[in-house]
Image (tube, coloured by chain):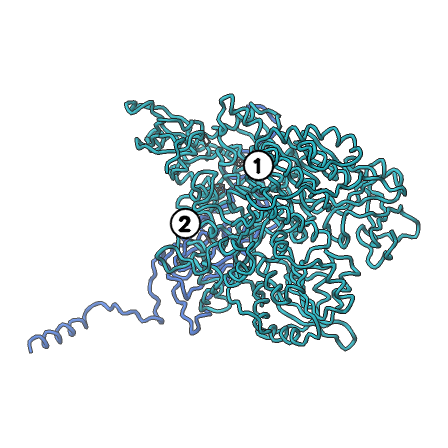
Chain colours: A blue, B cyan
Amino acid sequence: MFSILRAIWTVFLHLFRRKVTVLYPEEKPRIPPRWRGRIILSRDPDGGERCVACYLCAVACPVGCIALQAAEDEYGRRYPEFFRINFSRCIFCGFCEEACPTCAIQLTTDFEMSEYYRHNLVYEKEDLLISGPGKHPGYNFYKVAGLAIKGKDKGENENESPPVDVKGLLP
Amino acid sequence: MEDKKLITVYIEDKPYRVKPERSMLDACLTLGFDLPYFCWHPAMHSVGACRQCAVKQFRDENDKKGMLVMACMTPAAEGVRISIKDPEAVEFRSKVIEWLMLNHPHDCPVCDEGGECHLQDMTVMTGHVYRRTRFKKRTHRNQYLGPFVNHEMNRCIQCYRCVRFYNDYAGGRDFGVFAAHDNVYFGRQEDGVLQSEFSGNLVEVCPTGVFTDRTLKAHYTRKWDLQTAPSICVHCGLGCNVIPGERYGTLRRIRNRYNGQVNGYFICDRGRYGYGFVNSERRIRHPYYVTCGASGEKEENKLDEGKALPHAKSLLQGAKGTIIGIGSPRASLEANYLLKRLSGPENFYAGFSGRDFNLVRRIISILTGGPIRTPTLKEVAEADAVFVLGEDVPGAAPMLGLALRQAVRQKPVEAAKKSGIPVWNDYAVRMAVQNDKGPLFIAASAATRIDPLAEGVFHGAPEDIARLGFAVAAAIRPDAPAPQGALPEAAARLVPLIAARLKTASRPVIISGTGAGSMAVIGAAANIAKSLLESGKGPGLCFVVPECNSIGLGLLGGKNLKEAVAAARQKRADTVIVLENDLFDRLSAPEAEALLAARQVIAIDHLPNHTVSMAHMVLPAAAFAEGTGTLVSNEGRAQRFYKVYVPGGQIEESWRWLAQLLAATGGAEFFTLDDVDRALAEEMPVFGGVPAAAPPADFRMSGLEIKIPRQPHRFSGRTAIHADVDVHEPKPPVDPDSPLSFSMEGFDGRPPSALISRFWAPGWNSVQAVNKFQSEVGGQLHGGDPGKRLIEPASKGPSLSYFTGIPPAFKRAWDKSLFLIVPLYHVFGSDRLSALSPPVAELVPSPYLALNPEDARDFTAREGAEIRLLIEGVSFRLPVRFDASIARGVAGFPFGLPGLHGVELPAWGRIEVKMSGWAEKSAGREWGEGEAGDV
Ligand code: SF4
Ligand code: SF4
Ligand code: SF4
Ligand code: SF4
Ligand code: FES
């Protein structure tokens, strides 16, 4: 008997506590920036596609839900010909983001991805690519890599000397 | 039983028994230790250039201080004491990597070597993690090196392996190291196509991403994403072991698969880059039958799944007469055998040309009928005297050419060894050897790429080559038949020299084959081998055959294709089944047309060709990487190749189509490859070894129920690859024919040697992991090298008698416009399948006719001028190429080039100069021209 009264009393006290229920979806919750939600592909500061199709995210993915194919433009810049994430398999572990050497693949704060049909959760590159650099505004992989691409010849990198003159013998 | 020659060395104070005459690096790797290295290569040994393999060596057990030495330059001698784990050695090695990395670009994500990079592996192994230097990186400009190899010079770590392979091992002359100090540059003197037919090995030899596979780049995939299976190269008769890799349903690349007895660490560019035909847009992917449309043109009617067999069955059951089968030297042994079952032995025709049929038959009778042994490629490379009779070795069988490049070093290296230089000390050996070469003699129709290595060379007509061979045999053993009359002077001079060299050699090898198109040449080679055998030597007799299963088909038997033509002409063939063959390559056009004029023609092939275009029904066949089967190499080695991936469409292995047809028409039932092989072995004793060539389909690693996976355990994207089509992952295909699965799950240890799908070991992602699969470095794979030799010399029984039939000396035709047309071979072009691959096609020479300049002057003074050539009623229009190595009265015709087929060589041909009224047309064949009896 006593315990029933005590329970009623406790419930009654809750009337005066701060509300934790959020009226989602009318009211949006605050998501911390390191949240691991919907995955995007970002662009480098120059607006070029960041992803160089190195396959590291795909191999890091524990459920194998990333598939892509590398291609190369006429100047030697790598990009993914297609890039597919099957979100119906993704466990939002973030391994892909951690593996990515170019900061291209990033997990975002968006988690509202429910679909009635599983195949609508298969995202292609068009669905993934955003127009900005995302969480890493400054990084441009091709400014540090040794490959020459359009607009950046050998030796023009941040940390490079001009190409060697093979015929020169000076020390 | 322990080998008495073994010595004891101490590693980390533990004794180990190892073979002497090796370096300590070699010994450590053989024992399974992980010791980093760069410049050392198991086939090219030590130079001590990179300083990566440093270890501590101690004088004795009391020496606690020790000194740093390079393991690769330290001989494995009795009592040698080293430590790999010594802290000073560990630190030294990590510093070496750090120096090498000073200038290394930040490239791994965009580097094609990544994921199978020896530099990555060694960096991880030594523990170097962060770049501390703040200085600028050195950069280099790249070169265009042709369609096969990509160049990215920034990544070089100056290990010198590339030059050592390209120049020292493979004899290339257009590659080198330039510049000075830390600027050294590895490449060509100027941009251009690499000239060596082994250039593709740079991709595997270079421990970094400087040289990468350019054809892979076009559809780049990392090693961990490639589905792979053991396979056999189909582009010549040597049967090199390869690993094709697939991703997303297309073939991505070919890599070498180590086989100690066959190709070792290398393959040629024809084998590495000839795979493109498998991905061709023109592939036949669905069965179809042909009907006559309303306006009389042919209509192809695609047959849906399950409809092809009933249709083919109705064709076969509706046959109004004999069904004949035409086999193929490029189809698997199983396919040929089942076709033979289907048509009956009396109606089975080996799909060789008439000429090749006789030549291969003679080769087989020599190899199976006598006590002479045919050597493996490795044994050829170890020969100390070689005589090549009538064969363009580099052109027809490139890897045999690489073996000969090693064979000429045997004698001088032995001399160096006598003066106390260990064989593994490569630079010292090369200094001692200088330009010395062991005995190699070449008799061929024209200059070959290995002529510069030879002590003596003779160029002449096949008759004179054969006569030279017979004369050499007679000089070795007087009871061997000698040619009547004089030899050409150049040949006569060589006879005593060759005979003496062969007689004094301890491992002489004679090389001949079908290349000269002459029975007498083959007979002469056999006579030399026999004469050597009788004088107490154990000679090797190696025959070059044109295709990947020439020997298998030859052993299987069957009749001459010419008889099939006769049968067709007499209306004795109602239905013709052509297996993976273009009869227009084997027969003259009128003959092929007569044969294909049968009432019903069924073709089984993977690409459209002239024969397929004339067939009434076509079944889509699997290309080598899409099927499982057995091929028999020139050495008589039965080797299994496995389906790498399941091709799209309704493609099936030819043997499976035939097995189904056989069962449908009331014949025996075969469900798996093992069934076929067992039946074959039972029926023909010579094939008794075929089932043992590789483990059967029910083989499992001891105590385990699981299969061996074709996909690496890191294979990515398994839940996304098909997601665009269906989010439910498909069930992996089943494979009833092998112990391999189309999955990444299964046994992850070291499988039996014939089932090795990739070389990988923990910490060793690059191809250098092969060390972990060998019982000793450079030796055989664990459990023995794959394949089963079907032909071993008969120790007892009838001994081969000497061939007589010595041809008379070659005489120029009285008519100065008549020439003996002989075939010339090209690495790129003479094999038709590889020439269909776009990168190889770029390097196929354009057709020509090679003439001695003296002869050519009778027609034209200008090289490149067009002439008309008539051979047995077929006419070709070709530009003249001057070739001083060709004998007078002989003309060289490039074998197998597109547009140049349908004639059997050697044959007499008439050359006509350009006359007014000729239409300006590009070089090549003039179809429909040429009246029979024109010559
Ligand atoms: S978050 Fe994890 S599961 Fe999802 S794609 Fe990335 S690696 Fe794969
Ligand atoms: S890891 Fe990054 S750069 Fe590499 S493929 Fe994935 S997204 Fe592209
Ligand atoms: S060579 Fe190796 S270490 Fe260098 S960039 Fe390429 S993968 Fe990375
Ligand atoms: S190019 Fe490759 S093989 Fe040649 S020296 Fe450089 S790293 Fe070594
Ligand atoms: S491997 Fe020993 S010094 Fe290079």
Percent position of residue B705, x then y:
37, 60
Q: Nearer the viewer, mark 2 or mark 1?
A: 1
Mark 2 nearby-residue class (10 Å; few <14, some 14–19, many ≥20): some
Percent position of residue B139, x then y:
54, 35
Mark 1 Cβ and ligand 5 under 8 Å apart = no
- Side of B7 relative to B459 (left or right): left
Q: Earlier in the sequence, mark 2 or mark 1?
A: 1
- Side of B142 relative to B585 (left or right): left
Q: Which residue has dot 1 on it?
A: B538
* Residue toward you, A164 or B9: B9
Residue lying farthest to the left in this orientation: A2
Can you see residue A147? no
* Residue toward you, B674 or A101: B674
Q: Amino acid at mark 2?
A: Arg
Snapshot quadrant of residue A149: top right
Quadrant showing the N terminus of chain B: top left
Q: Which residue has dot 2 on it?
A: B750
Can you see residue B77? yes
Snapshot quadrant of residue B10: top left
For the residues labelled 2 and 1, the Cα–Cα distance comes to 36 Å
- Contact flag, marks 2 and 1 (Cβ < 8 Å): no
Count every numbered label the image shows and give the total: 2
Callout 1: SS: loop
Mark 1 nearby-residue class (10 Å; few <14, some 14–19, many ≥20): some
Q: Which mark is residue B868?
A: none
Residue lying farthest to the top in this orientation: B419
